[in-house]
C-alpha cells in the first residue's frame, strides 16, 4: 500500500465513480437516497465536529479544515 500513488484529480474521480457505480448497481432508489443523505450528513458532521490539531473544530476555511488535514496525512508529499 505504501507504493500506491493517487496523484491526480482524474484518478480520485475514478475511485469515486467506481463506488458510486456499485451503489447504483446494488441499491434501489430508496437505498440510493439513503446513501446520498448519509454521505452528505456524515461529511458535514465531520467538517464541523472533528477537531483539527492546532486549528480546532468547525473551521471551514480552505487549507484549515478537516478535509485538508486528512489530505495532508494520506497524501503527504503529493499536495
Image (spheres, helix red, strand yellow):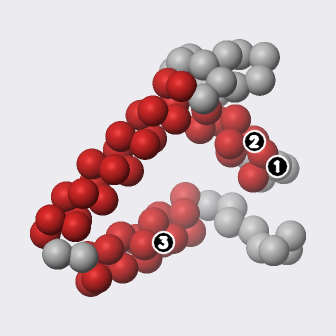
Q: Is residue 9 above or below residue 31?
A: above
Residue 72 disc label = 2
Any part of residue 46 in sight: yes
Characterize the local packing of mark 1: few (<14), some (14-19) or many (20 or more) Cα atoms within 10 angstroms: few
Q: CA distance from mark 1 to mark 2?
A: 5 Å
- The total of numbered circles placed on residues is 3
Q: Which badge, 1 or 3, comes first in the chain's sequence? A: 3
Which percent across, then down, holds residue 8? Answer: 62, 61
Which percent across, then down, holds residue 42? Answer: 43, 42
Q: Are marks 1 and 3 in contact (CB under 8 Å)?
A: no
Which residue is outermost to the bottom?
Answer: 25
- 60 left or right of 64 in image: left
Q: Residue 74 versus residue 10: which sits nearer the camera?
A: 74
Q: Which residue is mark 3?
A: 14
Instruction: Identify the residue at image location x=27%, y=83%.
Output: 25
Which percent across, then down, holds residue 16? Answer: 45, 66
Q: Is residue 76 above or below residue 59?
A: below
Residue 76 disc label = 1
Amino acid at each position: 500500500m505504501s507504493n500506491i500513488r493517487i496523484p491526480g484529480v482524474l484518478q480520485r474521480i475514478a475511485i469515486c465513480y467506481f463506488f458510486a457505480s456499485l451503489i447504483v448497481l446494488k441499491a434501489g432508489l430508496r437505498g440510493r437516497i439513503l446513501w446520498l443523505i448519509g454521505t452528505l450528513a456524515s461529511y458535514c458532521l465531520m467538517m464541523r465536529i472533528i477537531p483539527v490539531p492546532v486549528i480546532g473544530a468547525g473551521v471551514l476555511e480552505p487549507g484549515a479544515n478537516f478535509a485538508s488535514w486528512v489530505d495532508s496525512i494520506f497524501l503527504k508529499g503529493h499536495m
